[in-house]
Amino acid sequence: MPYTYDDQNIFAKILRGEIPNDTVLETDHALAFRDITPQAPHHVLVIPKGPYVSFDHLAKEGSDAEIAGWTRAVGQVCQMLGVSVDSGDGYRLICNSGAHGVQEVPHLHAHILGGRHMGRMISKS
Ligand code: DGP
């Protein structure tokens, strides 16, 4: 089954400027903004500007420039937040994907969570 992108999802609206956001970084291929319901002192979402539903979608159909641009933006935000491994205490990077990944917004986004110890990765609930 092909990937289907819903251009009415909330992050598409943010990209079009229809909904405000607290921008941390904008580049040619990515937008990073603070999560509306932060789960940690630092909680930033990094999205590609292209219409990709999930990580696997970008990896399969994105151009090298889009993949590199989004990946570089994630790293740049880690540096900006002061959580990078070279100069900070680290972070958790999550891409919830699809039904079993409990993805709520169907536009690829990386959660960068930091500023506290994040505990073990997965609970059984
Ligand atoms: P998930 O799809 O489950 O990986 O998480 C979606 C995240 O998006 C969730 O942490 C809340 C956040 N979110 C949902 N709507 C908005 C919004 O309008 N603005 C911002 N900044 N974040 C949002």
Image (cartoon, grey):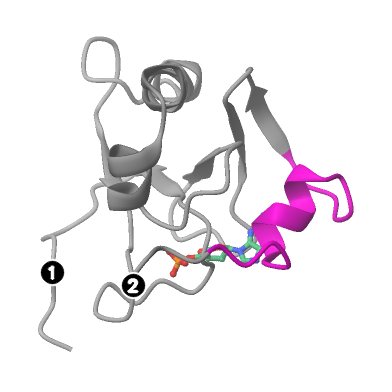
x and y, in percent, of residue 89 in the image: 25, 27
Query: Which image quarter holds the C terminus?
Result: bottom left
**In the image, 59: left or right of 48?**
left
Label 1: element kind: loop
Q: Secondary structure of the magenta portion, mostly? A: loop
Image-based side of 114 in relation to 90, left or right: right
Pointer 2: what residue?
Answer: 98
Using residue 58 as the reference point, say whether residue 29 is left or right of it.
right
- Residue visible at 22% across and 10% down in the picture: 86
User: Which residue is at 40% across, 42% downward?
Assistant: 112
User: Mark 2, residues whose alpha carbon is within 10 Å: few (<14), some, or many (≥20)?
Assistant: some
Q: Name the residue under label 1.
A: 122
User: From this viewpoint, is residue 80 visible?
Assistant: yes
Quadrant where the N terminus is found in the figure: bottom left
Q: Where is residue 113 in the image (x, y as percent from the top left)?
A: 38, 46
Q: Quadrant location of residue 35?
A: bottom right
Q: What stretch is highlighted in magenta?
A: 5-22
- The answer to whether 24 is drawn above or below residue 113 in the figure is above
Label 1, label 2: how many angstroms apart (C-alpha)?
17 Å
SS for dot 2: loop
Image quadrant of ligand 1? bottom right
Q: Does the magenta stretch include residue 10?
A: yes
Which residue is drawn at the image coordinates 57% and 24% (left, top)?
29
* Mark 1 residue type: Ile
The residue lying furthest to the right in this view is 18
Among numbered discs 1 and 2, the one appearing first in the sequence: 2
Residue 119 vs residue 55: left or right? left
| Residue 32 on image: x %, y % | 59, 35
Q: Residues within 10 Å of mark 1 (few under 14, many from 20)?
A: few
- Asked if the stretch drawn in magenta spans residue 37, the answer is no
Q: Residue furthest bottom?
A: 125
Residue type (three-letter) at the residue carrying disc 2? Gly
